Amino acid sequence: MLADASRARQSTVIRGGGTKIGWGRVPVAVDLVVDTTRLDRLVAHRHEDMTATVQAGVGLAALNRRLAEHDQRLPVESAFEGTTVGGLLATNDAGPLRHRYGTPRDLLIGVTLALADGRIVKAGGTVVKNVAGYDLGKLVCGSHGTLAAIVDATFKLLPVPRASATLVASYADTDELARDAAALAGSQVELMAFDLRMSERTGLQLLVRLASSPVATAALTREAKQVLSAQTLVVTSGAEQDLWAEQIRLPWAGQAAVVRLSWRPSDLPQVVSLVRRLTRAGCGPITLVGRIAGAGLLRFQGDARAVAASIADLRASALVGHVVLLRGSRELKDLVDVWGPDPGGAAAAARALKRMFDPSGILGAGRGVI
């Protein structure tokens, strides 16, 4: 299909579960949609080596159910039901477990791609330590389907923890939260997830997840509580699962605009103050959910012009970077560039890669960065 589309110069979109089909720029035209959901096989689960090869159309939830049969998992979360492995890699989307395990590109060790001219290429391998060929896997992670179609992927896996507990600390003062976060980050306590939440309903909170054996988890929980100065609630079992499910889905509730951004951990108090100023500037209640290490999502509920002005303010600030509009109305996308200004001239290199992998320029329909 891709070879035919290249010959006919058909504008083509690769689609998995369709959960993030609205991300990116508004396409000028789409001639062909290639659906990958029939690529639905778990090719191999090498549970002794803790690796798995899976086709791109397999759902993340279904994959982890299969891996759990051997007490293993791919430690990546998604806010969207129906997220496929291919879509996960194409957007490099990650949740709170990013603190411990990184993004999908950090867990990927091998990939098979279908290029725009119809060729099948492979990179990486099936073992954690390999140097087989160019690292094309990391190149296509976050490419939003603009370079090639992902056919299958090989991941390193992690064991499912035997016990888990989460500390929820609430703060009235941002500086106190930042001091506690810095103290915990600098301690010997090994954290599974380390998140910030600021919303109209919950106020300002720090969420700390600890997971290991039952004895080790209990010891880690005691150590973490001693570091935190705020009143702290310990959550376990089903309530803990519900808490993290809410944390992952919170930015995406309703149809509000969602913006991704990053910051230096040391600038966290100033970033929270910046978000509060945007709220007072007419954007309505703003929800901030993110990793303490410096990446997060903002949910805006104001009108398109107010949100566009807030995005411009964020991009003009030295406190935050990589400000990208992930979800927004057509009106909002007409007012702002989804991807933002070119950071340090990277667009020229990206265009060169695009010409190399997709010389006919058929992939992505103009939705991606390139």
Image (tube, rainbow, N blue to C red):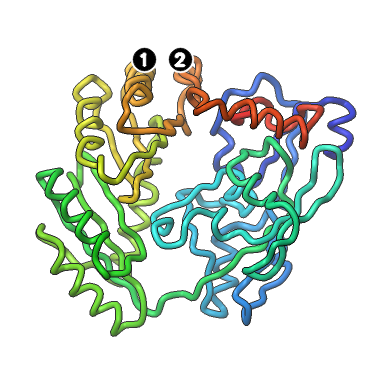
Residue 142 at what x, y percent from top left? 58, 42
Name the foreground residue: 147 vs 149.
147
Residue 156 at what x, y percent from top left? 59, 67
Question: In which quadrant of the rendered image does the C terminus lie?
Answer: top right
Relative to residue 271, is residue 173 depicted above or below? below
From where the camera sits, is residue 19 visible?
yes
Residue 185 appears left or right of 138: left
Disc 1 to disc 2: CB gap under 8 Å: yes
Residue 11 at what x, y percent from top left? 75, 27
Q: Residue at x 26, y 57 (%)?
A: 207
Give the secondary structure at mark 2.
helix
Q: Residues within 10 Å of mark 2 (few under 14, many from 20)?
A: some
Q: Residue at x 58, y 72 (%)?
A: 67
Instruction: Kindly identify the amino acid type of the residue bearing the numbered disc 2.
Output: Leu
Name the foreground residue: 217 vs 70.
217
Residue 128 appears left or right of 78: right
Which residue has dot 2 on it?
335
Instruction: Kindly identify the amino acid type of the residue bearing the numbered disc 1.
Output: Arg
Q: Residue at x 51, y 47 (%)?
A: 93
Using the rendered view, name the quadrant where residue 42 is placed. Answer: bottom right
Q: Which residue is at the far bottom?
A: 215
Using the rendered view, name the quadrant where residue 154 is placed. Answer: bottom right
Give the secondary structure at mark 1.
helix
Q: Residues within 10 Å of mark 1 (few under 14, many from 20)?
A: some
From where the camera sits, is residue 39 visible?
no
Residue 327 appears left or right of 39: left
Residue 305: mark: 1
Question: In which quadrant of the rendered image does the N terminus lie?
Answer: top right
Name the foreground residue: 75 vs 174.
174
Q: What separation in Å lies between label 1 and label 2 (alpha carbons)?
A: 7 Å
Sequence-earlier tag: 1 or 2: 1
